Image: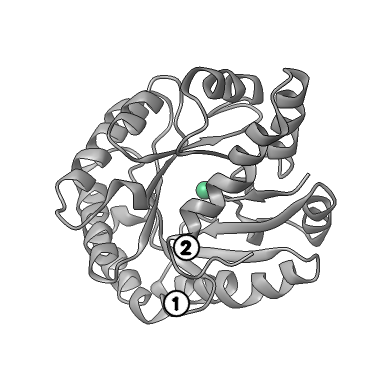
Amino acid sequence: MRYIEPHAHMVSRTTDDYERLSLAGCIALSEPAFWAGFDRSSAAGFRDYFDQITVFEPVRAAKYHIAHYSWLCINPKEAEDMGLAREVMSLIPERLKRPNVLGIGEIGLNKNSRNELAILEAHIELAAQYNQLILVHTPHLEDKLKGTRLTLDALDAHPEIRPERVMIDHVEEHTIQLVLDRGYWAGMTLYPDSKCSVPRAVDMLEEYGQHRIWMDSACDWGHSNPLAVPRAILELKRRKHSQAFIDQIVFQNPKTFMEQSGKFVI
Ligand SMILES: [Zn+2]
């Protein structure tokens, strides 16, 4: 079954993973800029990383007939150093023109600190200025509800940001309603041992419906599974959901959201 993986950190994965994604039916994926598992020591590290996800990874993905798209930002974890954050942000505008760049992301909060919030607001302003889509990372565990509220408030406060052009990723049972009620898109990240398991995600789909929702694996350098979305498809089939319902969640919804960029073509 065809599907889109809308959140994958392929710089951390092998070509075998690209092959497995392709064999499982993945025809397109998007790669948000994020923390690499270690703090980079200078803006030059980000310049190379931006080249990697806008130039190198699309070529690697194409060998497996997967269209590769990306998002640019400095992630909240490294944004604590505001001088570095501003320097990295200055690299972004000219790179937004690259053909596979869909917008600004994954921005957001990690520990909900004052510096993180200031850089989040600066990214929101950048997205508004260049009319970009936004992909948001929400914090983990005890910081999630507060961080989600702070993020939505910052987005709502900007007069030019339209909720239907913003994806709030890593929602869980206690944040999904809040996100959908305020008009934003909600992403469910399927992780082996944190965020959201496959059965929990399918429970949420059954409760909240299939509108403005996607699922992703957010596979990265840590314990994660690039084939998490196909596993969710299997669970949906086991629970007797229709082909049309499944197709909307794993294909039509990410396509609809990302097509708003004007660049996403499959
Ligand atoms: Zn991510």
User: What residue lies at 58% left-to-right and 47% top-to-bottom?
Assistant: 252
Image mark for residue 195: none
Quarter of the N terminus within the rendering: top right
Give the spatial CA distance, label 2 vs label 1: 18 Å
| Left or right position of 179 against 171 | left
Q: Judge by depth and name the residue closer to the eye, 48 or 235.
A: 235
The answer to whether residue 257 is above or below residue 210 is below
Mark carried by residue 44: 1
The amino acid beneath tag 1 is Ala
Residue visible at 59% across and 45% down?
A: 218
Q: x, y percentage for residue 127? A: 29, 63
| Residue drawn at x 72%, y 17% as measured from the top left | 239
Q: Disc 2 on helix, strand or loop? A: strand
Q: Are marks 2 and 1 in contact (CB under 8 Å)?
A: no
Disc 2: CA contacts within 10 A as few (<14), some (14-19) or many (>=20): many
Residue at the (34%, 40%) spot, across then down: 184
**In which quarter of the view is residue 62 placed?**
bottom right
Res 216 visible? no
Disc number lying in front (2 or 1): 2
Residue 21 in sight in this render: yes
> Image check: 151 left or right of 140?
left
Left or right: 26 as drawn, with respect to 117: right
Reading the image, the residue beneath label 2 is: 71
Q: Position of residue 81 (x, y in %)?
A: 29, 58
Q: Residue 97: x percent and y percent?
A: 43, 80
In the rendered view, would you say 149 is above or below 46? Answer: above
SS at mark 1?
helix
Report the amino acid beneath label 2.
Trp
**First in sequence: mark 2 vs mark 1:** 1
